Amino acid sequence: MKKWRFFWLAGAFVLIGNGVFAAEIRVNVDRNPVSLNESFRIVFKAVAQVDGSPDFSPLERDFDILNQQRSSNMSWINGKSSREEQWILDVMAKRAGDLTIPPIAFGADLSQTVSVSVTDSPQAQAADNAGEDLFLQVQATPQAPYVQSQVLVSVKFFRRVQVAQASLTEPDLNDALVEKLGDDSTYSTPINGVDYTVTERQYAIFPQQSGKLTIPALVLNAEVLGGRQPRFNGFFNRAPTETRRVSSDAIVLDVQPVPQTYQGSAWLTADSLTLSQVWSDQSLSVNVGEPLTRTITLSAHGTTVGQLPELVESNGIDGIKTYPDQPLLKEDKLSGGLTAVRQEKIAYIPGKPGSYTLPPLQLVWFNTRTQKAETASLPAVTIQAVAADGGQTRPAEVLAQDASTRPDSPIAAANTAAIPNDAGYWPWLSGFLGLGWLLTLVRIVVKSRQAKAVVESARPVAPLFDFSKPLRDACRRHDPQAAKNVLLAWGAQQYGVDNLAALAGCCAQPLQLEIKQLNRCLYAGDSGDWDAHALERAFAQHGKQPDRAPPPQTLEPLYRL
């Protein structure tokens, strides 16, 4: 075991040295589209150590870099450390049009490519309000969305006076889902030769019914600093303020119903959608009784995670057992829209040798950019299951070698005929020398085992780790996954087992019953019936009871250490 562990670690270091594990660098902008002569922010985010310092010179082709800063954050959660680094750039476009933020080199690592739409002039509504000290502007895109599709709402607060504080009402809609996107962004823009400071907030609205949908006027209350300054500075001599109230215009959306030509089993709209899968063993070959894990990821931009359908049906295939895990659901509420991700993991355990074909996976969705239905698909997959003892079809040369050892084989008869009957004293001499060699080998093996036993007895025994506190913490947080990890670590130290079923066989009641109950809850994916306090009490009482020997295992468990 130590030998294999050494080779595995050496291979991992070689892969890391060759740069196989490249850091993923994501790129986001604080808003999109932007107007010419308006500054906006580009954020480069890496969740792993990058290869080197960034080179932002490719940006200077289409953008002026006004300011840049760097921040890093380290966190430690559940015994695992995570690192996040950000490079924040304030830029301004040099020309209008659809511009591209090119890949930026961080040593050998490259960032993503992002497109930005730059308009030729500030908003027309903003020009209509030119001359006012402060005003509010609301825009919605698109004006005629489909039901349950994303509508981006931009709220901009323009001002050319100093504001002490301000409060804005939220969009209140009965027949739509409203999600705030990212953080507010602040920048400056010129209107008719006058510089205004703009604070922009974005929302994603998902209408739930077709027909007319009205986004009511939003109201902003602001405390504006007066022009007269106090004579003396201090807490009791603050500048006077006046309360100003501004409101936006109401916006009416014409929500379209589901097209009659749509043939999908469920209505799903998005700006873009990707469907991918990864297998734990790319050869798709597995021994009988061992799991082969399939991870399917669905990522869609412009939709909510609640609209993403289930990817794999629960019904299995004859001869193979299916164990789906709880799906991983995630939403990224960034500027430019909502991104929903659904990830499902399924473990396939064949019960007998053979080939098992999984059907293709197809998902019909409606592309709101092209206004057409599209299909995302994964091809059919064939799993090869072989006997656990390696009992698959044997090569011809191996069969020929076996045939030569059978007494009734022609090959064996020919080999026997080739040996002369009268070999003289040479067979006796060979047998005597072979016996002496065998006795010498036995003596060497016996002495080596005795020496190893002496070394092992002289080696100090490391103290056993006390798992009472981590198990108590996991039970009081009602975290069955954490409790399982603690029990598996304890079982490996105490009994040398690596699964909950074997660990339960080593323990006496009531701990045995509680471990089995935890295992059932993990398989069912429902922790509501799990009694965490009962497991904590049973583990505390276990030290007073005798242990049992671990039972023999026949199949590899699904939940391994």
Image (tube, rainbow, N blue to C red):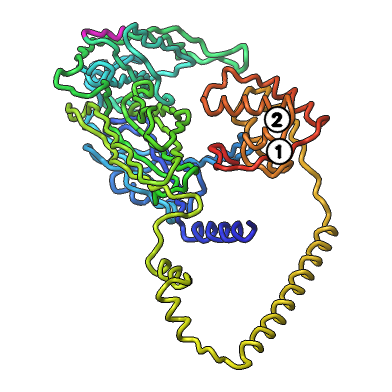
> Which residue range is magenta in the image?
211-216
Q: Which residue is mark 1?
A: 490
Where is 468 relative to 292, above or below? above
- Label 1 and label 2: CA atoms lie apart by 10 Å
Question: Is residue 73 shown above or below 311?
Answer: below
Please report contact status of discs 1 and 2: CB closer than 8 Å, yes or no.
yes
Instruction: Tell me the residue at 41%/12% (across/down).
Output: 168
> 556 or 443, which lies in front?
443
Q: Residue 383's image quarter?
A: top left
Question: Residue farthest to the bottom?
Answer: 424
Q: Main secondary structure of the magenta part?
A: strand
Q: Which residue is mark 2?
A: 471
The amino acid type, in three-letter code, at marker 1 is: Trp
Q: Percent position (x, y) of residue 426? A: 62, 91
What residue lies at 80% left-to-right and 59% top-to-bottom? Answer: 456
358 vs 206: above or below: below
The quadrant of the image that shows the N terminus is bottom right
> Hey, what amino acid is under mark 2?
Leu
Query: Which residue in the rendered view is the most extreme toward the left?
Result: 261
Question: Is residue 250 toward the left or the right of residue 495 in the image?
Answer: left
Q: Residues within 10 Å of mark 2 (few under 14, many from 20)?
A: many
